[in-house]
Amino acid sequence: QAFLAPAISTPTCFAVAAMALLRAAASLAARRAARPALVGPLRLQPQSRALATRSAPRLGHNLEDHYDMAEFMCKMHHPLGEYMIWGCMLSMFAVTFGPMMHSNYYFTGRFLPKDQGNTQLCDDSW
C-alpha cells in the first residue's frame, strides 16, 4: 500500500483542460475586441454612385408591399397623385379627340357620325 500514489482523478483533469480552453478563448476575444472592427469586404461597397449605376435587385414577394407601402395599401395616402394621373389620361383623350369631334360638329352638326352613314365622297370622284 506504500506504492499507491494519489492519482489525479479524471473529472479534475477535464476541469483543468476546460479552464485552459476558456482562458484561451477569453484572451482571443479580448484581442479581437481591441482591434477596430471592419465594416465588411471592400469589394461589396460601391466606390462612387453615378446616374447610370443601379442598385442590386430586391428579390422579394408581394407581401412585402403590405409592409413597405402600408399607407398606400390601406389607402391612407393623399389622393392628389392619383387625381393627377387620371387628369393626364383625361387630357390626352381631350387633346386628341376633342378637336376631331369639334370639327365634326362644325361641319355636320353632330359630334360623332352615324354608323354606316353616307359621306360626301361620290363613287365617281376617284
Image (cartoon, rainbow, N blue to C red):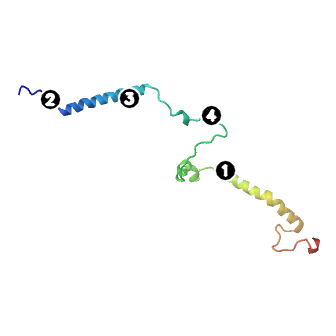
- Mark 1–mark 3 CB contact (< 8 Å): no
Foreground tag (1 vs 3) = 3
Mark 2 vs mark 1, foreground winner is 2
Q: Position of residue 2 (x, y in %)?
A: 6, 25
Tell me which numbered mark, 4 or 1, is placed earlier along the sequence: 4
Tell me the CA gap for discs 4 and 1.
33 Å
Q: Which residue is mark 1?
A: 81
* Mark-to-mark CA distance, 2 and 1: 86 Å
Q: Which residue is mark 3?
A: 29
**Number of on-image labels:** 4
Amino acid type of the residue tagged 1 in the rendering: Gly
Q: Residue at x 80, y 58 (%)?
A: 96
Residue depth check, mark 3 versus mark 2: number of the one nearer the observer: 2
Which element type, helix, strand or loop, lies under badge 3? helix
Give the quarter of the figure containing the N terminus.
Answer: top left
Give the image quarter of residue 109.
bottom right
The residue indicated by pointer 2 is: 7
Residue 61: horizontal and vertical position, in percent?
53, 52
* Circle 1 Cα neighbour tier, 10 Å, few/some/many (<14 / 14–19 / ≥20): few
Q: Kindly report the distance in space between the C-alpha atoms of the residues bearing marks 3 and 2.
A: 35 Å
Q: Residue at x 47, y 29 (%)?
A: 37
Q: Amino acid at mark 3?
A: Ala
